[in-house]
Amino acid sequence: MVRPLSPDALIYDLRSASDPQVSPDGAQILYALATTDRTSKKVESQLWVCGMDGGDPRRLTWAGEKNGGGRWSPDGSQIAFVSDRVGAKQTGVLVLPVEGGARRAR
């Protein structure tokens, strides 16, 4: 049975993908995925990567509430992005190895 679309569902159940970036080798797509937390009522944006067919989605960022503007390095091994995790009321540009590892501030 299909349940009716409610205002609550429109706010908390929908996710929004934005700013897709194709990797230099054309095999992956980097994107920001925004969700709204039911408890805090805050919008959070994290970076994800998936295959060109949308398969094998993998979350890349876990810290900070607003991560976005991701861009591939020319060799596709790193991603530069903007995040609010730098400090209270500050944003910064960070670099993240695509295959895991710690981020570096730039």
Image (cartoon, rainbow, N blue to C red):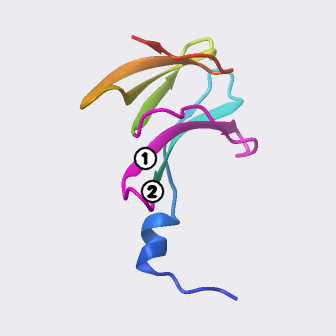
Q: Residues within 10 Å of mark 2 (few under 14, many from 20)?
A: few
Which residue does the image show at 75% across and 41% down from the upper left?
Answer: 56
Q: Secondary structure at mark 2?
A: loop
- Is 43 left or right of 71, judged from the image as shown? left
- Whether residue 38 appears in magenta in the rendering, the answer is yes
The furthest residue to the left: 89
In percent of width and height, residue 35 lies at 47, 54
Q: Quadrant for the C terminus, please.
A: top left
Q: Name the amino acid, label 2.
A: Asp
**Who comes first in sequence, dot 2 or dot 1?**
2
Q: How many marks?
A: 2
Q: Quadrant for the N terminus, please.
A: bottom right
Q: Which residues are magenta?
A: 36-65
Q: Cβ–Cβ below 8 Å for labels 2 and 1?
A: yes
Label ID, residue 37: 2
Q: Which residue is mark 1?
A: 44
Q: Main secondary structure of the magenta part?
A: loop
Q: Secondary structure at mark 1?
A: strand
In percent of width and height, residue 103 lies at 52, 17
104 shown above or below 79: above
Q: Residues within 10 Å of mark 1 (few under 14, many from 20)?
A: some
